[in-house]
C-alpha cells in the first residue's frame, strides 16, 4: 500500500469525523460509439495516434490513475450492415498502449483483452512486456466473448455457452498468474565478472492443467515491475460480480444513481471476505460522462445539445431496433413508437452488440417504454435519449466536483472512469477546472507519489501463486 493513501485519509476528515476517501480517476478513450460525438467540429480522429497521445497526456497532467481502452473484436452489424458508429474500426490494444508508454511517465495503461479467443501464454507475454516497457503501469480488463458472430473471426468459429464463459476466464487468469509468477524477480544476475547471467537455470518453468488448458514450458519474460498487471473486470451479472470478488483489482459498473451505486458497492464489497480479501483490495469504478458550464443552467442546456448530437434520428431508430429486433428504418424518429411488438427469438438484427443482452425480456421493455413515452409525450428519439443516457455529472466545475466527491464518500464508488463526448480534447476542461477543486478538498492527489499503477490505486502486491496447486 502506498504512503499516499494513508496521508490523504489521515489529514482530511468529513463533517461526521470519518476519514475522507481519496477519489480515483481514469480516462476512457471511447472510439466511435454512442457517447462520442464524432460529427462535432471540435472532434478529431478516432484512430490517429495523436488523438490517443493527447488524451493520455491530458490525463497524466491531471494526475489520473490510468487511461482505459475498450476493444471490439468485430465490427458490429445491424440488418446485415456495418453499424454506422463502428465504421472507424478498432486499433489493436497492445500496439496503442505500448506507443503511449513512450509518451507518458506515470499514467496507468489499461487494455481490454478477451479470454475467449486468446491463449494465456500469448496474453501473459504481451502484458509482462507492456509492464516492463511502461515501468509498471499495465492493467488488463479481462472480458469474455458471448456470440458466434464474433467467433467467426477466429479459428474456433464458435462460442462458449454462457455458463462456461466465466469458467474459462477464471482458468485463463489462473494460468496467466502461473506464467507471471514463474519468475521470482531475482534470477537475472548479469554478473560480468563471473559470466553468470541467471542465478536459477530453471527460471520461468511453469505448468498449468485444467479443463480448458494443458500447458507447460518456460515463460520467456522475466518478472515485471508490478509482478502482474492490475486486473480489471466489467460485468454486472452474478457470475461477473463473483469473478471480480475472487480475482479482480477493480470492477467497472454502470449504475446511474447514488442509491443504485451504493447497493452495487455494498454487494460486491461484501463478497470479498469469503476469498480472504479486504474491502480496499477491490476498487469499484463506474463509467460516467460529464458536461460543464459557467452556471448549472448553462451546463444542462449544453448537456441537452450533446445528447441530441449523440442520438441523431438515425441512431435513435438503430437503438430502438435492438429492442424491437426488426427493421424500423421506415419509422419516423420524431413520431411515436411502433405499434408492433418486438420479435422474440434467437435471431437478432443487431449482431455483436452487448446491449442486446441487457434486454432479456424485450416485450417487458417495450411495455415500459410505451408507458414512459405516453406519460411524457415522447417521440422515438426523445424516448431513446431518455432511456439510454449513461450517468452524467452536469453543472459548474464546483457542482461536479461536489457530486463526484459525494458518490465516493457515501460509498457508491471508489472513483470514476470518465468518458468525454469529444475526442481527443474532451477531457481538457475537466482537467483544468474540476481536478483543482478536488485537490483543494484533499480528496485527489496533487502529485504522483508512486510509480506503478498498483501504487496509484493503493492496491497491495499480488499474492504469489507458485506454491498453490493447479486447478
Image (spheres, grey):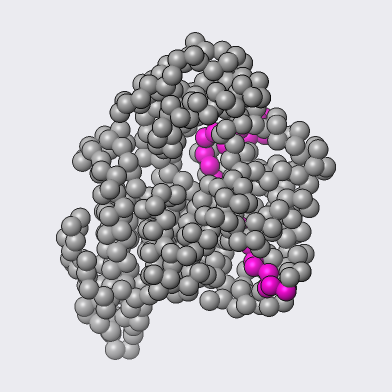
- The residue that appears at 45% across and 15% down in the rendered structure is 340
Whether residue 385 sits left or right of residue 198 in the image: it is right
- 296 over 209 or under it: above or below: above
- The residue that appears at 69% across and 58% down in the rendered structure is 406
Q: Position of residue 9 (x, y in %)?
A: 66, 74
Segment tinted magenta in the rendering: 17-44
Q: Is residue 93 visible?
A: yes
- 20 over 331 or under it: above or below: below
- The residue that appears at 50% across and 69% down in the rendered structure is 279
Quarter of the rendering occupied by the C terminus:
bottom left
- The residue that appears at 57% across and 64% down in the rendered structure is 106
Q: Is residue 139 visible?
A: no
Q: Position of residue 45 (x, y in %)?
A: 56, 36
Whether residue 45 sits left or right of residue 432 in the image: it is left
Q: Quadrant of residue 176?
A: bottom left
Outermost residue on the top side: it is 330
179 vs 361, nearest the viewer: 361
Amino acid at each position: 500500500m502506498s504512503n499516499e493513501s494513508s496521508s490523504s485519509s489521515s489529514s482530511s476528515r468529513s463533517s461526521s469525523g470519518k476519514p475522507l476517501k481519496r477519489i480515483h480517476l481514469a480516462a476512457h478513450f471511447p472510439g466511435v460509439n454512442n457517447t462520442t460525438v464524432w460529427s462535432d467540429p471540435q472532434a478529431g480522429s478516432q484512430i490517429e495516434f495523436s488523438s490517443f497521445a493527447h488524451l493520455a497526456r491530458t490525463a497524466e497532467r491531471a494526475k489520473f490513475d490510468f487511461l482505459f481502452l475498450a476493444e471490439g473484436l468485430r465490427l458490429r452489424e445491424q440488418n446485415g450492415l456495418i453499424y454506422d458508429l463502428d465504421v472507424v474500426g478498432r486499433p489493436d490494444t497492445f500496439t496503442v498502449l505500448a506507443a503511449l508508454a513512450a509518451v507518458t511517465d506515470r499514467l496507468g495503461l489499461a487494455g481490454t483483452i478477451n479470454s475467449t479467443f486468446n491463449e494465456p501464454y500469448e496474453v501473459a507475454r504481451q502484458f509482462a512486456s507492456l509492464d516492463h516497457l511502461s515501468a509498471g503501469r499495465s492493467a488488463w480488463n479481462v472480458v469474455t466473448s458471448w456470440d458466434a458472430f464474433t467467433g467467426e473471426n477466429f479459428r474456433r468459429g464458435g462460442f462458449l455457452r454462457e455458463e462456461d464463459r466465466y469458467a474459462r476466464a477464471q482458468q485463463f487468469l489462473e494460468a496467466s498468474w502461473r506464467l507471471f509468477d514463474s519468475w521470482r524477480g531475482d534470477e537475472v544476475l548479469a554478473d560480468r565478472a563471473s559470466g553468470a547471467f541467471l542465478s536459477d537455470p530453471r527460471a520461468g518453468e511453469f505448468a498449468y492443467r485444467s479443463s480448458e488448458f494443458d500447458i507447460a514450458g518456460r515463460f520467456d519474460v522475466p518478472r515485471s515491475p508490478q509482478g502482474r498487471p492490475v486486473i480489471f473486470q466489467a460485468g454486472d451479472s452474478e457470475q461477473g460480480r463473483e469473478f471480480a470478488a475472487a480475482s479482480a483489482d477493480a470492477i467497472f459498473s454502470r449504475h446511474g444513481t447514488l442509491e443504485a451505486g451504493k447497493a452495487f458497492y455494498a454487494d460486491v464489497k461484501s463478497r470479498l471476505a469469503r476469498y480472504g480479501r479486504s474491502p480496499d483490495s477491490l476498487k469499484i469504478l463506474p463509467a460516467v460522462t460529464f458536461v460543464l458550464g459557467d452556471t448549472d443552467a448553462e451546463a444542462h442546456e449544453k448537456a441537452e445539445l450533446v445528447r441530441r448530437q449523440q442520438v441523431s434520428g438515425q441512431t435513435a431508430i438503430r437503438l430502438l431496433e435492438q429492442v424491437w429486433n426488426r427493421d424500423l428504418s421506415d419509422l419516423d424518429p420524431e413520431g411515436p413508437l411502433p405499434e408492433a411488438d418486438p420479435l422474440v427469438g434467437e435471431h437478432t438484427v443487431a449482431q455483436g452488440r452487448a446491449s442486446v443482452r441487457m434486454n432479456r425480456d424485450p416485450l417487458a421493455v417495450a411495455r415500459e417504454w410505451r408507458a414512459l413515452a405516453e406519460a411524457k409525450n415522447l417521440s422515438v428519439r426523445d424516448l431513446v435519449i431518455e432511456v439510454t443516457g449513461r450517468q452524467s455529472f452536469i453543472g459548474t466545475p464546483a457542482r461536479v466536483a461536489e457530486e463526484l466527491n459525494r458518490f465516493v464518500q457515501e460509498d457508491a464508488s471508489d472513483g470514476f472512469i470518465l468518458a468525454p463526448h469529444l475526442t481527443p480534447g474532451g477531457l481538457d476542461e475537466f482537467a483544468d477546472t474540476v481536478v483543482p477543486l478536488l485537490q483543494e478538498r484533499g480528496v485527489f492527489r496533487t502529485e504522483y507519489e508512486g510509480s506503478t499503477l498498483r501504487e496509484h490505486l493503493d492496491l497491495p502486491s499480488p499474492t504469489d501463486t507458485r506454491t498453490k496447486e493447479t486447478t
